[in-house]
Image (cartoon, rainbow, N blue to C red):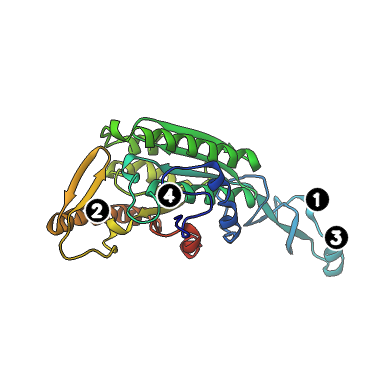
Amino acid sequence: MADTRLPLFSDGVNLTQKELLACQTIARALPEKRSKARANLAGHRASLIKGRGMEFAEVRHYQPGDDVRTIDWRVTARTGKVHTKLFVEERERPVLILLDLSHSLYFGSSLLLQSVQAAHLATTLGWSAIQHGDRLGALIATEAEHLELKPRSRQQGILQLISAIQSLHERQLNQLSEYQSEPEHLFRACQRLRRIAKPGSLIWIISDGANLTENCLAPLSDLKRHCDMGAFLITDPLRQGTLALPKQFQLPVKEGNREMVLNRAGYDAWLQKQLSSQAHFTQMMQKLNVRTRFIDAGMSLNDQIGSLR
């Protein structure tokens, strides 16, 4: 019998384009956040910087360097002093999603694989970006490859993201038995992101935190100087210690190509490693002054909209 808690078109393991297209509904519930623009970008986003644009802001005294075309002659005639009009500039910013699809995310104890939840989140953020007139790009990272998607507008941006996530997720799922450790692959992804992200971009980091090493701090710090940044940590009830378990049990667990059976003592030790990894991720984000939001793979994303705002 189908689990009625599952998102539309999802089975929790395999990823389909239909379920990623359905994330558009969640994105509509997300508010647009105004932030100070950091670069001279033209587009549809109203910034807090006042200058030339379409939306009138205020009138003030003319200052040397102001465009004479913006002089308000009515106010100037009435006051006897030259006044100029100011407008709210429109800005179109690139939104870049760093999506971690490492093998450690192909884990799930309740509703969804963490990789599936990460895909739902990335696509929802993508839908939100294009709905607000931004250009959407991504860097999807696995142990074997980095897939770079250049920022594109409107439907082109979201459709290229959906296609890339779905195909790469399927490849990773089919190669779990061939898993090979690659401890610095996210570091290389961060270095690459530093090269492709333009000043003024908004960067979302989506990961389970298992593969983000201290080496990642340097390229991410460089990015944070010129870009806005936010982070999402994808968790699972078993890795959080929130799943109800009996006092004594034998629990089969598979991570990558490693299989084990945990009793109570073994699980407690394993859980501490998971929590330590998550804490390390949040501490790294704190060093960058980046807020970390937690997203649980044991719940549908629609039930966690509050964490996305």
Residue bearing the label numbered 4:
12
Task: Depth check: give the residue in front, 250 or 298.
Answer: 250
Q: Position of residue 53 (x, y in %)?
A: 73, 52
Q: Residues within 10 Å of mark 1 (few under 14, many from 20)?
A: few
Task: Depth check: give the residue in front, 237 or 47.
Answer: 237
Secondary structure beneath label 1: helix
Could one spot residue 180 in this view of the protein?
yes
Q: Label 2 to label 1, Cα distance in Å?
A: 61 Å
Secondary structure beneath label 3: helix
Residue bearing the label numbered 2:
274
Amino acid at dot 3: Trp
Q: Position of residue 32 (x, y in %)?
A: 59, 59
Q: Please give left or right for residue 130 compared with residue 53 in the image.
A: left
Residue bearing the label numbered 3:
73
Which of pointers 2 and 4 lies earlier in the amino acid sequence?
4
Q: Residues within 10 Å of mark 3 (few under 14, many from 20)?
A: some
Residue that appears at 15% across and 59% down: 264
Residue bearing the label numbered 1:
69
Amino acid at dot 2: Gln
